[in-house]
Amino acid sequence: MKNIVVLGSTGSIGKNTLEVVRNLKDKFRVVGLSSNSRWELLAEQVEEFKPEYVALNDCESVEKLRRRFHKNQLNILTGSNCLKEIVSREEVDVVVSAVVGAVGLPAAIATIEQGKMLALANKESLVMAGHIVMPLARKDQILPVDSEHSAIFQSLHSGKPCEVKRVIITASGGPFYDYPMEKLSDVTPAQALKHPTWQMGQKITIDSATLMNKALEIIEAKWLFDLRIDQIDVVIHPQSIIHSMVEFCDGSVIAQMGMPDMKVPIQYALTYPERSPLMVQSLDLSSVGSLTFKKPDMEKFPALRLGYQAAKEGGTMGATLNAANEVAVQAFLVGKIQFTEIASYVEKVIHNHHFIKNPCLGDILAADTWARQEVKKCLI
Ligand code: NDP
Ligand code: MG
């Protein structure tokens, strides 16, 4: 029996994780849950899973939750360190990091430093500070939840690290892949939030539409699998059936496939190296019909080009790109900027930033703060 904490349990990955855990009751006991402000859903989850701890960011929500549960019944952690505190409880064995954004980084570092398993959905932690996070982790201590990285991780088991030629990350292309380039500036948040194949949180759905999600995933893959940038290719695959591939030195390409359902990579991260039965739709290739592939268009989707640039340059580039993107996506969602301006703001900020090649955590956090302020300044 392993004790598990789910950071971001009220989000899309968080809810899918609890669904997985509900079916693995003999293997996992939920000891901690967390959310930003959705305290009512968090309260329902507390009633079902009966964790000892919750971490809740928003002060007003904390008061509401306090009124609902007696203090002997539930420990409520709050304040800027609450995610780090909850993963640091002694009884915790496994942490699923499913919070969105830079806020996940300190808790990811604490989890690894304390030798606990980290099932990582929060790709932002690696994008910002892969060079700090990865050297702290032992082999297979960080298990990828991101579907592409889970696919690569699974495919890598077909050979040795020195036999890997390259990885091929698939991308659905989002809702606008075939949209005329000149009309992209007019797309609305409602249009951008309609993802063709995956149901996800708002931020990653917008990132999928700009292809910034793929940009972040290139950086995530570089760190997770210790790859050179010329070993990371992206291909557009609108059906999202092949979740990614690995090409080995003998020309064999191993792919991991399945219907798009995040419960599969979540469960694999939790049960690895074993597999457990899971109620998901079976892949019926004859009803899928055809699997198609296209070259990514970096002119139409400049975010992808920026992702390659940040992956190549390293240093503070990833943190700056990520922070600028987080603020720009929020600005787009509230109607302050156009869809195409998201990538323009990010490009401007990474271009102007004071680059540090070997940044410490303090430098990373400072770059994050600076990039957020830069985008905000332009928005006034
Ligand atoms: P959601 O927006 O659905 O959920 C985010 C979770 O984080 C919620 O529980 C939210 O709480 C919490 N949260 C948000 N801001 C804060 C904060 N400042 N402090 C503490 N908690 C916070 O996101 P997703 O589940 O879609 O994505 C989560 C992560 O997983 C992201 O890094 C994403 O890139 C990655 N990922 C997601 C995939 C998906 O299919 N959704 C696929 C692959 C990766 P509240 O509910 O109160 O707002
Ligand atoms: Mg992904």
Image (tube, rainbow, N blue to C red):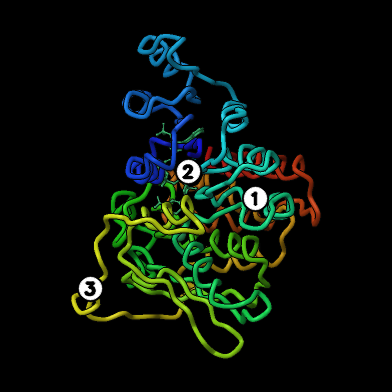
Q: In the image, what residue type sits under mark 2?
A: Ala
Q: Which residue is mark 2?
A: 98
**Residue 8 position by quadrant:** top left
Ligand 1 within 8 Å, label 2 CB: yes
In the image, which is nearer the foreground, mark 3 or mark 2? 3
- Left-right relation of 4 to 347: left
Q: CA distance from mark 3 to mark 1?
A: 38 Å
Near mark 3 (Cα within 10 A), the count class, few <14, some 14-19 or many ≥20, is: few
Q: CA distance from mark 1 to mark 2?
A: 16 Å
- Left-right relation of 373 to 326: right
Q: Quadrant of ligand 2?
A: bottom left
Q: Secondary structure at mark 3?
A: loop
Q: Which residue is mark 1?
A: 128
Q: Which residue is mark 3?
A: 284
Q: Is residue 90 above or below residue 64?
A: below
Query: Residue 361 in the image: x percent, y percent?
Result: 75, 43
Q: Secondary structure at mark 2?
A: loop
In the image, which is nearer the foreground, mark 1 or mark 2? 2
Near mark 2 (Cα within 10 A), the count class, few <14, some 14-19 or many ≥20, is: many
Q: CA distance from mark 3 to mark 2?
A: 30 Å
Task: Give the residue at the far bottom of this rendering.
Answer: 250
Query: Residue 224 in the image: x percent, y percent?
Result: 62, 61
Can residue 180 be seen in the rendering of this structure?
A: no
At 67% from the left and 43% from the top, the residue drawn is 115
Ranked by sequence position, the earlier of labels 1 and 2 is 2
Q: In the image, what residue type sits under mark 1?
A: Met
Q: Secondary structure at mark 1?
A: helix
Ranked by sequence position, the earlier of labels 3 and 1 is 1
Q: Are the residues at dot 3 and dot 1 in contact (C-beta closer than 8 Å)?
A: no
At 65% from the left and 74% from the top, the residue drawn is 161
